[in-house]
Structures are given as C-alpha cells and as structure tokens.
C-alpha cells in the first residue's frame, strides 16, 4: 500500500460537560458524553521511504507543528518505523469550536498510518499513543460514543440504546473562538458539580432526549465571548434548546423542527449534520 486517500476525521459534541473537581496537579475532573457527528475533515496519506513527514494544507492553514505531525512522530518513535508520509488535510471543522477537530485529525492519522506502514498495532496500543497528544484523541481512537470521566482519559463506550437513532443537529459557530485554558483558569468556573451516573443519563435520555445536565464551562465562556450567549438565544428564539459543546465557541441543538437561518449574522458558520453510532474508521484497528 503506497497511499490512503479520503480518510474522514469526524467532529464530536459534548452532550453535557460537568466539572466535578480538581486534582492537586491542577487538572480538572470532568464528566461528559461524547457523541460523533458526520461532519468531517478529510485527510490523504502518501507513503514516503525516507522517514520524513510533510504536510500540505488543502484548506484552512494549520499551525506549523500540528497534532497530525505530532501523532505521526509518536507512531514512528514507538515502533521504530523507518517509513515516512506526506499528509494532506482538507480542513472543514472550525478551530476553537469545541468540536474536537484537531484531536480527530490526530486520531485518524494514527489509524491511517498504522495501516499505511503495516504496523499492526491494536486499538489499545494506539490509545496509549493518543493519551499524551490531547484529552479528546483517545475518544476518536475508541470509535464509539462514550461516557467520559477523569481528565478525559477514562472512557466507557455507550450501548446503542443510550443514544437515540441518527438525528439532525444544528451547529452554530460564532466568528470568535476561545482558548480552553482561559476558561479553566477563570475564577468564576464552577468546579463542584455532583458526579452523575450512566444510568441517570440513560434514564433522562428516555424521558427527555438530549436534555441531561448542562455545560459547566458555558457561563464563563459567555463572559469571555458574548456571541456564545447570542447564538444560544438565537436558537431559543426559534424553539430549539441550544447548548455549548466542549469549551466552545460552537453551540448546538437537536433539530426537532426546521428553522429559517436567513436572519443569522453573516459572520456565523451554521452547519446541519447527523449523529453517528460508530466512527467511520472503527474497523481500522483490532480490539484485543
């Protein structure tokens, strides 16, 4: 195999995000449910024989040393692989949105290069490489919607019945973005939400789909970026229950009915997509 093209890197939503405490080392303890979306970046990989790694941006320019290159170097280092790769990225997911775009790109890079370089690593092997790259990367390696705890490293795949079948979601991304560190360091952040349970989440889903919990980061994010509150209110005015995903600034809502988006500010990005039960690359790594 000399190339793999059209590799998807899907977005995710945080259906809720609770901050339940803080470790002595400063890391925050979280609970969330991560749900995959069919909105994706697309990556292309060509094998190189000189061990060199190169990247080509086919859309939005990325930082010089992005997560994809870091993921590829980590894979080379862990396996001693002497092959390289040219990585081309068609970026569609917005940055600083809370959609996990960079983390998803890194996970798809690990999965694709594991195949392109014929390394044969298991999902558990790739999960260990994913952990140092970022809190969301292991989720995308896992390939299934998941209950997430700890600092993002404790994942438990959710049974299909825990989420409703594919449903349209509207994603509203204000022009401004947010640095995650600015939210977590803010003195107004609520850090003592009582721990929830999977059973409680599933039970609430049955009574009121996608109504469980809240996003503890949203009040602080709205202080730092008022357009988040404006986007949520815009959705509410149209009868949709909007909520910020991750550390923002994107706001999402299940589309229980069709709405007119013509009155949205021109600077907002609006996308309608559906949830996924499985990552498109879930079969690209073996389970042990």
Image: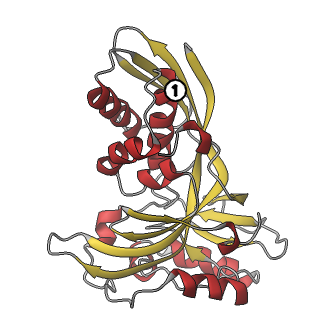
Q: Which residue is mark 1?
A: 115
Q: Which residue lies most toward the top here? A: 49
SS for dot 1: helix
Residue at the image position 33 percent from the left and 51 percent from the top: 131
| Front residue (pair 196, 271) | 196
**Picture quadrant of residue 22:** bottom left
Is 217 situated above or below 6?
Answer: below
In the rendered image, residue 233, in percent from the top left (x then y), is placed at 63, 82
Identify the residue shown where x is 14% and y is 75%. 24
Q: Residues within 10 Å of mark 1 (few under 14, many from 20)?
A: some
- Left or right? Give the position of 123 relative to 264: left
Q: Nearer the viewer, residue 91 or 152?
A: 152
Front-lying residue, 284 or 261: 284
Position of 24 with respect to 275 (left or right) is: left
| Side (left or right) of 167 relative to 38 | right
Rendered location of residue 194, percent (x, y) = 39, 91
Query: Relative to 1, does residue 169 appear above or below in the rendering?
Result: below
> Does the rendering let one see residue 118?
yes
Q: Residue at x 47, y 55 (%)?
A: 139
For the N terminus, the quadrant is top right
Query: In the image, 271: left or right of 71?
Result: right
Name the residue rendered at 38%, 89% in the picture: 193
């Amino acid at each position: 195999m000399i190339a793999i093209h059209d590799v998807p890197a899907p977005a995710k939503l945080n259906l809720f995000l609770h901050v339940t405490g803080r470790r002595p080392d400063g890391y925050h303890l979280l609970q969330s449910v991560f749900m995959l979306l069919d909105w994706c970046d697309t990556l292309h990989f060509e094998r190189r024989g000189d061990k060199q790694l190169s990247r080509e941006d086919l859309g939005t320019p990325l930082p010089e040393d992005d997560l994809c290159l870091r993921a590829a170097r980590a894979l080379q280092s862990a396996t001693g692989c002497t092959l390289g790769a040219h990585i081309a990225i068609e970026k569609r997911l917005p940055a600083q949105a809370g959609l996990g775009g960079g983390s998803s790109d890194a996970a798809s890079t690990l999965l694709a290069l594991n195949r392109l370089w014929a390394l044969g690593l298991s999902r558990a092997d790739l999960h260990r490489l994913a952990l140092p790259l970022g809190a969301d990367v292991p989720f995308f390696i896992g390939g299934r919607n998941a209950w997430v705890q700890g600092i993002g490293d404790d994942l438990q795949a959710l049974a299909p019945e825990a989420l409703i079948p594919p449903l349209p979601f509207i994603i509203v991304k204000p022009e401004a973005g947010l640095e995650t560190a600015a939210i977590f360091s803010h003195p107004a952040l609520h850090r003592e939400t009582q721990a929830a349970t999977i059973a409680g989440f599933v039970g609430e889903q049955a009574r009121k789909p996608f109504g469980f919990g809240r996003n503890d980061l949203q009040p602080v994010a709205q202080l730092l970026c008022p357009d988040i509150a404006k986007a949520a209110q815009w959705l509410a005015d149209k009868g949709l229950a909007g909520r910020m995903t991750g550390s923002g600034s994107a706001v999402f809502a299940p589309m229980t009915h069709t709405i007119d988006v013509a009155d949205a500010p021109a600077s907002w990005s609006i996308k309608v997509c559906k949830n996924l039960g499985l990552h498109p690359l879930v079969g690209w790594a073996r389970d042990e």
